[in-house]
Amino acid sequence: MDSYHITGGKRLAGEHRITGAKNAVLPILAGAVIPGGVSKIRNCPRLSDVDAMVRILEGIGCRIRREDDSIEVDAGGVDSCRIPEHLMKEMRSSVFLMGPLLARCGEVVLSHPGGCEIGRRPIDIHISALRKLGVEIRETDGGLACRAANLKGTEIRLEFPSVGATENLMMAAVAARGETRILNPAREPEIRDLQDYLVSCGASVEGAGGPVIRVRGAGPLKGAEHRVMPDRIEAGTLLAAAAITGGQVLLTGAMPEDMEAVLEKFREAGCLLRTEGDKIELSSPPRLRAVDSVVTQPYPGFPTDMQSQFLALMTVARGECRIRETIFENRFKPAKELLRMGADIRIEGPVAVVRGVEALRGARVAAGDLRGGAALTVAGLAAPGETFVENVCHIDRGYDKLEVTLRKLGAEIRRIEE
Ligand code: UD1
């Protein structure tokens, strides 16, 4: 497996254009199965998770054409509602195909999903919501067999605003008779992007981002062209990379209005931020200040997907910071690796207490999940000496050649292929 070799201590400076959002492109590609025609999805990032989704789509009979950053999905030939088990295991997002395949074929057979090991990640909320919509779900040995004989719109309150369950339900509901009202939905901006795509296909969906999403079943959908929104987590990660090196960065093609909770924490840490239109400019002080506390929350709160990068940032800030993870129970994995780099972190249940040290030191560390891997890379940029980050495959799931972007900004980082 590939690793990164980083020589830390270089100040980052420069400009970068943000790529399309991983968490938007995956459900949208899954949603492209619903219409019988061709959808063209533009601004797709080059990620291994996107490649995995493309393989799944091909596996169920879609024809795919990729050109530059566009992916054309011709779902006309979808001939299977069975998701191959080995592909399902590769990526948790394959669970997003439940809703679209139910809408398209009235049936779906799938095994339990894989993905990052950041906790139990059950799918009970998906299942109970789909059942309320009229889906019959049977647990089989290795997975689930679902049948949608008679989907009927109704009011469904999610017990927790799960991102994936909200998206699955929206996509299944486009094929239900009457109106579905999703109460307590996730409000993440990527859900708005999925809504925009479904509306372009002729669906009647409204309310994404608010307290109720309304979906009215509206007959067969047509394929559509859609441009994927920018990745707010890529943007946040690059801000962290610049900030930890005392650097300065200008991000373009971003959506700062979707990142308020994260930008606020950078300000609290002593960074100067300027936002205008699709631009975010960050200048950081020579040494960051520890922010009092960070608590991960569903949107619009601080995103769990930025928690690890912030943990890395706080290891060298002046003072003490308490980071509480409330979404995934197993997301402090990078802490152990950061200790090897000289960090001072104490884990107390769901809280990481980080006391900033003067400097980290280079070490050999291993990524255990996607954002944890990004966090170790960020830490390596600030650590004098050499850092090796192993298992870069986790990082490739969600960043479009992170090392190339960082090098362009002045980092000394290269990929060692193995
Ligand atoms: C999505 C994102 C992921 C992000 C997460 C939270 C994508 C492709 N992935 O993941 O990057 O970290 O949102 O913002 O968009 N839960 C249940 N039962 C369920 C579903 C979820 O208990 O049926 C729990 C999960 O275990 C977790 C929490 O709810 O503790 C949040 O999960 P969810 O919002 O569903 O995250 P994902 O859609 O998997």
Image (spheres, grey):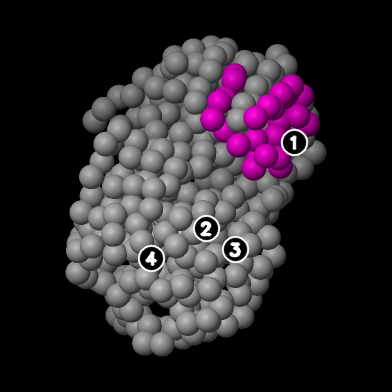
Question: Which element is circle 4 on?
Answer: loop
Residue at the spot 76% in from the left edge and 42% down from the top edge: 293
- The spot of residue 86 in percent (x, y) is 24, 60
Identify the mark at residue 413; answer none if there is no mark.
Answer: none
Question: Which element is circle 3 on?
Answer: strand
Residue, disc 1: 264
User: Mark 2 is on which residue type?
Assistant: Gln
Distance in Å between CA atoms under marks 3 and 1: 29 Å
Residue, disc 2: 195
- The spot of residue 36 in percent (x, y) is 29, 64
From the viewer's side, name the closer residue of 86 and 249.
Answer: 249
Task: Check residue 276 for magenta coloring.
Answer: yes
Q: Closer to the N terminus: mark 3 or mark 1?
A: 3
The image quadrant where one finds the N terminus is: top left
Q: Are marks 1 and 4 in contact (CB under 8 Å)?
A: no
Q: Closer to the N terminus: mark 4 or mark 3?
A: 3
Q: Are marks 3 and 2 in contact (CB under 8 Å)?
A: yes
The image quadrant where one finds the C terminus is: top left
Q: Is mark 2 within 8 Å of ligand 1?
A: no
Residue 168's place in the image compared with 178, above or below, is: above
Q: Closer to the N terminus: mark 1 or mark 4?
A: 4
Residue, disc 4: 221
Look at discs 3 and 1 and give the one toward the viewer. Answer: 3
Residue 266's place in the image compared with 205, above or below, is: above
From the viewer's side, name the closer residue of 5 and 61.
Answer: 61
Task: Check residue 202 for magenta coloring.
Answer: no
Q: Closer to the N terminus: mark 4 or mark 2?
A: 2
Q: Residues within 10 Å of mark 3 (few under 14, many from 20)?
A: some
Q: Residues within 10 Å of mark 4 (few under 14, many from 20)?
A: many
